[in-house]
Image (cartoon, rainbow, N blue to C red):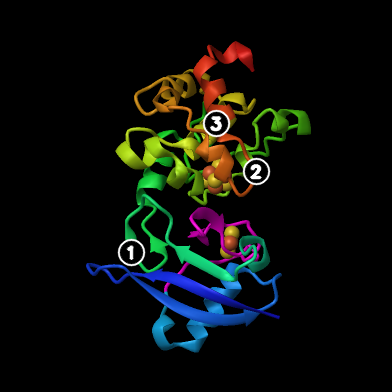
Amino acid sequence: MTRYLLRVLRQEPHERARWVWGEVELAPSATVLDALERLRERGGDSLGLAYRAACRHGACGECSVQVNGRGVLSCMTTLGSVCSGHQRVEVQPLAGLPVLRDLVVDRSRFFTALREVRPWLARAADVTPESTPASELPMTPEQLHTMQGADACILCGICASACPVTTARGAFAGPAAMLKLYGRLRDPRDEDPRGRLALAHGPLGAYRCRGALECTASCPRGLDPAQAIASLRIARGAGER
Ligand code: SF4
Ligand code: FES
């Protein structure tokens, strides 16, 4: 067991943010999410501490926060991996998004931008997010591979939070949306390649990117949205599939 000192940023709606401190004794293999739970159970300054989490195994993207200044999934980040030498851990909400309360941010802008690129499968029969195809549309592993991991993105929002263009001006759909868009452009089941290209080269698309590469550096799934954006920029037609 190791003693860790947590510094957590708390904020009530319409009030100034304030740091609270708390000590937990946990194994280095325990996660930041475990530490937050322990703190909240203990009460005191951390009474009612608000944070999001659901799956606890890196699949839902709900638990994204900043730990020691970096966007991470709190359920997949061990205390041992963020403490080198000293035992302090600083936790604050994802940067660049409005805080609803404590570590909970409003990600509606992120999801609105995602909807703008229509990340769902477009079929001639007009498949909408609410409807389902009449039969299965299988893909080969090779076809899946060309989507550059777009299917593995869990929409945690960490890349968008790290992207200086997305957070500063909001005039870019953002790296996750571009990755999803690229995946659909390469998806052999998708029947709207022209629409995909128009979005990729449109006002919210790939040319807004300034190449900071923070998205790829920060993705907890090891995905490469920057490469997808670069590929979207030079994509010229459905024939490239
Ligand atoms: S690309 Fe990575 S960082 Fe961005 S939303 Fe998807 S999983 Fe999260
Ligand atoms: S709780 Fe689902 S990714 Fe962390």
Image: 212 above or below 17: above
Any mark on residue 226, and which?
A: 3
- Magenta highlight range: 50-78
Label 2 beta carbon within 8 A of ligand 1: no
**Other-residue count near label 1 (Cα within 10 Å), few / some / many at <14 / 14–19 / ≥20:** some
Q: Earlier in the sequence, mark 3 or mark 1?
A: 1
Viewer-nearest residue: 49 or 113:
49
Q: Is residue 119 visible?
A: no
Tell me what residue is drawn at x 31 percent, y 68 percent: 17
Quarter of the picture containing the C terminus is: top right
Q: Residue 189 colored magenta? A: no
Separation of marks 3 and 1 at Cα, in angstroms: 29 Å
Disc 3 versus disc 1: nearer the observer: 3
Left or right: residue 9 versus residue 211 is left
From the top left corner, tell me how far across and down residue 212 is, in percent.
Answer: 48, 32
Q: Residue 51 colored magenta? A: yes
Instruction: Say which amino acid is labelled 3.
Output: Ala
**Other-residue count near label 2 (Cα within 10 Å), few / some / many at <14 / 14–19 / ≥20:** few
Instruction: Say which amino acid is labelled 2.
Output: Gly
Q: Earlier in the sequence, mark 1 or mark 2?
A: 1
Q: Main secondary structure of the magenta part?
A: loop
> Mark 2 = which residue?
222
From the top left corner, tell me how far across and down residue 237 is, in percent.
Answer: 54, 12
Tell me what residue is drawn at x 30 percent, y 37 percent: 169
Tell me what residue is drawn at x 68 percent, y 39 percent: 136
Q: Secondary structure at mark 1?
A: strand
Q: Secondary structure at mark 3?
A: helix
Any mark on residue 100, and which?
A: 1
Tell me what residue is drawn at x 43 percent, y 81 percent: 46
Viewer-nearest residue: 143 or 230:
230
Q: Secondary structure at mark 2?
A: loop
